[in-house]
Structures are given as structure tokens and as C-alpha cells.
Image (cartoon, rainbow, N blue to C red):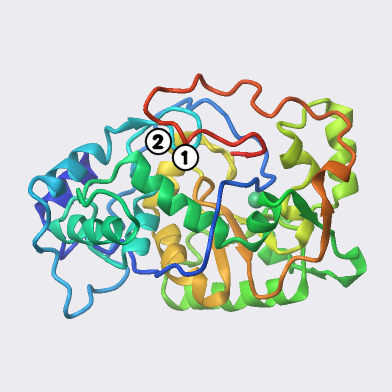
Amino acid sequence: MTLLVLLLAGCAGVGAWLAWPTSGPPPADPPTGDETPFEPAAQYVPSNDPPSAPLSPLPLDETCEAAAPAGAAEANAASLNTLSWAPFGRTETGWVIYAPRIGAELATACGPGTPRFAAALARWQAGHGLPQTGVLDAPTFDAMKTRWTLARPFAAINARGECPNAPAVASLSTAKPEEAYGGKTIQLRPGALEAYRRMVEAARKDGVVTDRDPRVLTIFSAFRDPAADAARCARDNNCQGVTRTICSAHRTGLAMDVFIAAPGHGPDSSADDNRRAMARSDVYRWMVRNAGRFGFVNYVFEPWHWEWTGEPPLPGVPISSLPQDGSQPLDQGAPTPQPGLKGLLPRKNEVR
Ligand SMILES: [Zn+2]
């Protein structure tokens, strides 16, 4: 509510949402391989919004006033924390989690309740064959989601039913202890780790990585050996979806999970209040705006999951040819589909 009020109050002081033009293709929502996807949101997490300070001033030529479709800014401001929908197959309330990424897509730093945001959204809708309402709705988000997914090379390969091979462990680089969360052994392809280091250096310069919380942007999961994943899946008889287990993005050595924020939750908890806190954090907003400069793309449902695009995944094999021991039906436990949200429900092989 605080955020909403501030956004309504004006954008000049609180508008730093971002501007990260996305480019390139995209498709459905492929798996990332992250675990523990559906924890209940157990507790209220105090909001840390608005960010302690604007991440950067608005561009000189951008004000948050603009000619937008009548009522659109007001509608967005109202739905930001109230929209009931299921963008990833389970019911969510509001879209503040995705607002930073949407703002980047629209190349505006103005907040989601501003006329500028609504005007940019209307233009985007026009360019993508959608009604120019200027109001964020499920079909508009779905079209953006498709673009974002296709911007992930792993996801695009996965959507074709293929799974990249894993690199040899001996070819990987190991992160330094201070780069790893909780003393874990973290391995990535060398180029990905070097790019990560350049990005963290930039984040430090910009003041979003500080000594105040040394966990920020440390890596808590990176390369995962497919054989070990499969063994765990079979052992636990809990694979949470064939694709997730059989073909995780983490097998590529290009994917990493970084600590963003986790008030009251684990750093990979997909509880909505956890993701909301991440989306409101300075560091996530910085990442959405800047990680692309270092070759990283995000799976928007998981603010912590980033994939490096500087080198392609290794050639792969059909997912159907991989061992599926211990796998379970993909949509087990999935929420009941809601009328009117057709097309937004997870695909059969989607891991959320
Ligand atoms: Zn991940």
C-alpha cells in the first residue's frame, strides 16, 4: 500500500523502476530446475519499498506525465497490488513482483501507476497486436513472458524438446569462498563466472552490493551434475516435474541462483511475499536494469535465477531420451485452471 500511494503521489522521486530494453526472440516457460517451488507464504514480510533511494535519475527527457488512455494509469495503480490472476498457473495477487521487468520491457523508469507507464504500455500493446488499453492484463503479460522466455537460450532449446548436454566438470571454474553462499562449492563455465565477477564489481560500484549484507549476489546454486540430480530424484521419488528434474538449466554450467533477499524465507523460496520483497529490493531492480550488460537474463518467476548468454549451451539430446526414473506427472498439484486465463496456464513440460 505504501508503494501504491507513493507511486500515485508522483514519479520523480520514486520512479526508478528501470530501463532494460529486451531483445531477441522467445516462447513458453521452461524450467529452471530450481527446487521448492510452491511453499506457502507463511508470514507477513515487512516491505522494504520504496527503494532507499532512486537507483538513477530519470532520463532528462522523461517525465512521468504523458498522454495515456483514459483511466489506464489509475487502473494500473489499483491492480498493482490487487489483480487476481494466475500468470504461472497458481493464483497470485497483484503484479508488483513483475513490475520492474515490465518497466524494463517498456523502457521507462516511471512507476507502474504513472501515465508514462500506461502510455508506454499502450504503445507496446499496439506493437504486439493487442488492444491499446494501456492497462496491464493477462494477455499483455503473456506476450511479454513469451519474449522473455525466448531470450533464454536454454529455454528456447528446451521448448523444442531438447536438453543441452552438461560440460565436463573438469572444464568448470570454481567460485571463491566469498562468492558462494553459505560455504557451498559453486561451479560455472569459466566465461559465466568471469561475467558474474564483472557484474558484481559494477553492482558494488553502484552501491547495491555493500558490506552491510555480504550475502547479496553471492551464488547459492550454479552447476548441478545431471547424474546427481537424477539420483536425487529417484532416491526421493520427488522430482517435481519431469523437465525440472531431467533437464534443469543448471546442468549447462551457465545458470546461477544468486542471493537477492529472503526475509523469513530461503533464498530460493517462491513464496509470493518472498518474491515481492525481492522485486522491491534495490539489488533486483539493479539487476533487471543492468545484468543484460553482462550477458545475464532472468527467469521472471524466480528473481534469483539468472542465465548467462555469452556462450551457447552445449549441443543436446531429446529430453525423451533421458532417464526419467522417479519422475512424477508434471501438473501434479497444479491449481485448478481459471476461466479467462487460457494460454497462461503452464504447458505440460513447464516448470514454475
Ligand atoms: Zn536456478
Label for residue 45? Answer: 2
Q: Secondary structure at mark 1?
A: helix
Q: Of the residues shown, which amino acid type is indicated by label 2?
A: Val
Q: Residue at 40% x, 35% y: name it.
A: 45
Residue 252 relative to residue 287: left or right: right
Q: Residue at 76% x, 62% y: name it.
A: 253
Q: Of the residues shown, which amino acid type is indicated by label 1?
A: Asn
Residue 347 relative to residue 117: left or right: right
- Label pair 1/2, CB-CB below 8 angstroms: yes
Crowdedness near tag 2: few (<14), some (14–19) or many (≥20) residues, C-alpha within 10 Å: some
Label for residue 90? Answer: none
Near-viewer residue (168 or 57): 168
Q: Quadrant of the C terminus?
A: top right
- Give percent across and percent down for residue 281: 40, 54
* Above or below: residue 104 compared with residue 321: below
Residue 52 in view here: no
* Above or below: residue 277 compared with residue 255: above
Q: Earlier in the sequence, mark 1 or mark 2?
A: 2
* Above or below: residue 94 compared with residue 306: above
Where on the picture, by quarter, is residue 191? bottom right
Q: Residue at 30% x, 41% y: name it.
A: 137
| Residue annotated with mark 1 | 274
